[in-house]
Image (tube, grey):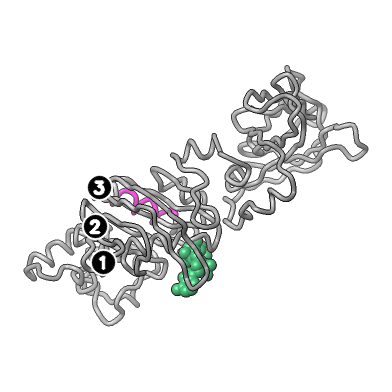
Amino acid sequence: MQGLHIYGVTHSYGSNKVLNGASLTIPAGELVCLLGPSGCGKSTILRLAGGLETLQEGNIVIDGETVANSDMCLPPEKRKIGLMFQDYALFPHLDIMANVTFGLHGMDKKKAQARALDMLDQVGMTAYAEAFPHMLSGGQQQRIALARALAPEPKLLLLDEPFSGLDTNMREKIRQETLSVLRDAGVATLMVTHDPEEAMYMADRIKILGRGGKILQAGSPNEIYYNPADEFVANLFGMMNRIEGVVENGYVDTPLGKVECKKIADGELVQVLVRPEGILFDTKQSENAVKVDVVSNHLLGHSSIVRMRVPDGSDRGLMMDGRVHREFTPELDKETWARIDPVNAFIFPLKSKEQNNNQPQAEIKPVAAQ
Ligand SMILES: Nc1ncnc2c1ncn2[C@@H]1O[C@H](COP(=O)(O)OP(=O)(O)OP(=O)(O)O)[C@@H](O)[C@H]1O
């Protein structure tokens, strides 16, 4: 029973029931990301696990020890946890060594300092042991926060939007470093984020939360990206082309060709969601490809978004976006043909307006177009 186990947690703030029987398990050495719209209760789960919020109903076990149930609730310092937040939360009046040794109560001073130095070495910050937090950049402070959180060898690490205060380049660097330090530590980690790309990068498993802390889908980044449970999950990961159609003989006929659909019955109204990278371009006709008009082409750096008009029987045509790696350089004297790559196309039943209104809105920041 190593790691974190949360069973049937229900939590309300006044009359606002935020969690309704939420359960979650994180084995030692695994990093789980909670991803979900603002207000769905992600931070509440993290705070309950850390003892920063008093448990109302349910049961929380860390490394085989019950830390909260209906009768008792251990304070954070008794839970063998490490915490890391967006704002680093270092003690401004203590130098870096004192910040990192802070959680090592009861340990002999020399041993504590040796442990702190070891942690500072792991995050590449040994040279800053005598500096004060205000002398460090955001990225450096976050490295210290990680060293401090891991110094007492916690059984559970809780990360709440840990990288959102950092600029893009620094964020990528620090999350890479954090991941490598966490792999070595082998600790169970629960991370909360709004950023689907960050969740994909960091997590062994992602849990997508909807309203009421309901888990809409749980799986590896690969499973969630290539096998989204519904259109809400599919839409989390950036731009989508959407085409409505009807299933006939196990296929949906779209203006960009037929897409196989074996899971939904013939005659059903469906929506086909196609990622921009799920549109394949060619300069000659091939099976299932359709001749399209390229309307515009936007170089984003390592890829380009290609806006195109697909003939659909209407005057205007159907506007769709494709993505090609690097620059899109159509040869002007040649035609452009496009078809759908089924790996990046997802078919879901078309819900009535009423059902759609009950779905969480996509308030999570979609990943930037790449
Ligand atoms: N201390 C509190 N008192 C009252 N309401 C609270 C408190 N903390 C959170 N809430 C409410 O509970 C709901 C869930 O909050 P929580 O912070 O867990 O959500 P979240 O998914 O982490 O959101 P965000 O991503 O915006 O941080 C929100 O409606 C929030 O306003």
Q: CA distance from mark 1 to mark 2?
A: 9 Å
Some atom of ligand 1 lies within 8 Å of the CB belonging to the residue at label 2: no
Considering only order in the chain, which callout, 2 or 3, is on the residue closer to the N terminus? 2
Q: Which residue is the extreme one toward the right?
A: 315
Quadrant placement of the C terminus: top right
Is 227 drawn above or below residue 118 in the view shown? Answer: above
Relative image position of residue 263 (x, y in whole percent): 62, 26
Front residue of 17/89: it is 17
Please give the label number shown on residue 72. 1
- Residue type, mark 1 in image: Met
**Mark 3 or 1, nearer chain start:** 1
Say which quarter of the image contains residue 162.
bottom left
Q: CA distance from mark 3 to mark 2?
A: 21 Å
Q: What type is the residue that disc 2 sits on?
A: Thr
| Residue 174 in magenta stretch | yes
Query: Does dot 3 land on a helix, a strand or a loop?
Result: loop
What is the x, y in percent for residue 90? 31, 73
Question: Decide: marks 1, 2 in contact (CB < 8 A)?
Answer: yes
The answer to whether residue 193 is left or right of residue 120 is right
Classify mark 3: residues with Cα within 10 Å, few (<14), some (14-19) or many (20+): some
Foreground of the two, 245 or 117: 245
Q: Which residues are magenta?
A: 172-181
Of callouts 1 and 2, which one flags the residue occurring earlier in the amino acid sequence?
A: 2
Residue highlighted by disc 2:
66
Residue 186 bears which disc, if any? 3
